[in-house]
Image: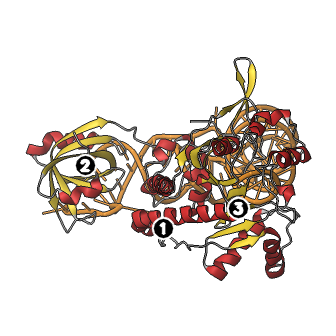
Amino acid sequence: MKKLYFKDLNQYFNQKIEICGFVDKIRDLQYVQFIVVRDSSAKVQITIEKNPENKAMNDLVSTLTKESTIKASGTLYDRPNVKLRGMEFIPTRIEITSVSLEELPIDINDYTKESNKELRLDNRFLDLRTEKNYLIFKGQTLAEMAMREHWIANNFIEIHSPKILGTASESGAEVFKLDYFGKTVYLAQSPQFYKQMAMAAGFNNVFEIGPVFRAENSHTAFHATEFTSVDIEISWIDSHHDVMDQEEAMCNKMIQKLKSSIGEEYARMYNKEINDVLPKFPRIPFFDAKKIVQEKYKYFGEKEFDIDRREEELICMHFKKETGSDFVFITEYPVQARPFYHMLDESGLTKSFDLLYQGVEITTGAQREHRIDILKKQAVEKGLSLESIDFYLNFFKYGVPPHGGFGFGLTRFLMKFFQTESIRDVTFLYRGPNRVNP
RNA sequence: GGUCCUGUGGUGUAGUGGUUAACAUGCCAGUCUGUCACACUGGAGAUCGCGGGUUCAAUUCCCGUCGGGACCGCCA
């Protein structure tokens, strides 16, 4: 049997078909019964008159519970007077394929108050049954597809770097340790070193979409201990601006794809259009950005060499007003805020950038230092032992193109794109300091 | 890791030092001429997170504990 998606049902009027899905609502009246059935794409009404001929089905429906799954065969009719999509399905046979318990641990109806978030995460499989949550993962699929299309058109190679590491990878974050046949190994907190290795391998341009692990005891809406990172690395760049050009192009493709594919559904569910994306995003050097926030908003961040949450929000607010852009690049971060492998410019600032989206940092990128002597010197200055990164330094001994790249937090992007309050809402199954189940 | 907040039927909330803990929704039963967030009537459902203390009396006040959240720090 080929599953018919309910969104396509208007092609099947007056035909004998089989439909299957979850029971969304049951309205059992004196002379007629209605079942609203739902699948991932839409809902449809099944109508059964109460009469001797239908007795078997009538009895079945009276025992049916919401959220059970059913299959029904019958005929679909065009019925303009039915409010739900102007159609109804008249069955000749209904099969209950599984029965749901009567009461659900969470309320999945859109029009009532949302259940407690923890309870929803405990019962994520039920939480995800709503059309709004389904749209998030449809959006994620399309976003990844758009990015892949962009990369393939630009000669990128997809890599799958290991997540079990003998030495800790470097992104400035804490790492998880685990037992590996009696030895201590680490979970990858970034594919950083390996995507650079691909540059040394002559792959020219690479990308990876994969999990990364961070042992940070962070209790915020923007952090998870495991999340999906989109990483790219490209060779033969002149500066970090070439990397930003790539990210700009990628984001444009992505937003345009989302707009063309789910723009209507998004507008219906969120009462708002997807914002247009500008072909070019504002690029503002770190200290200039600080200055704007200080002069315009009279806000003085506590961190001299980094940007705090409030500053991120104000910078985004400023450029949204000035240019209409949801995206803003902050460039030339001071060396104090950056890892050892970022390349420095003549003035001692890093050739690096962050990308902010709707007030949140979604990317860090840079031109990498590919000259081994300078790389070693910078590592030592950051307090790293050269032995610990020996395997990494090897990549630079036998010729390597100038290169750079970025890591893009897919869930952070989706969180803001879908206007959710937490990264947990856009993660299939969230992992955090206090959550490793289900 | 720091600061602050929170825990009451299945779910979401209200409320109180003192008789039967309220409301909405959900659930069950019945009624109902096609509903469409169906409607109406009735019913079941809560040792008020857990432990201790104060008190004649604690769901309420205090302490501890466990769970949870928000913001900050760290980062994507």
Mark 1 — residue?
Answer: A270
Can you identify the residue that label 2 sits on?
Answer: A4
Which mark sits nearer the N-terminus, 2 or 3?
Answer: 2
Residue under numbered circle 3: A240
**What residue appears at the point 46 percent right and 53 percent down from the top-left corner?**
A145
Q: Is residue A105 visible?
A: no
**Label 2 close to label 3 by CB (< 8 Å):** no
Label 1 Cα neighbours within 10 Å, binned few <14 / some 14-19 / many ≥20:
few
Q: Report the amino acid beneath label 1.
A: Tyr
Q: Chain of mark 3?
A: A
Circle 3 Cα neighbour tier, 10 Å, few/some/many (<14 / 14–19 / ≥20): many
Residue A246 drawn above or below residue A59: below
Q: Quadrant of the C terminus of chain A?
A: top right
Q: Quadrant of residue A419?
A: bottom right
Instruction: Judge whether A89 appears above or below A124 on screen.
Output: below
Tell me if label 3 and label 1 are in contact, CB under 8 Å: no
Q: How far is mark 3 from mark 1, CA to CA?
A: 36 Å
Relative side of A340 to A28, left or right: right
Write down the chain letter for disc 2. A
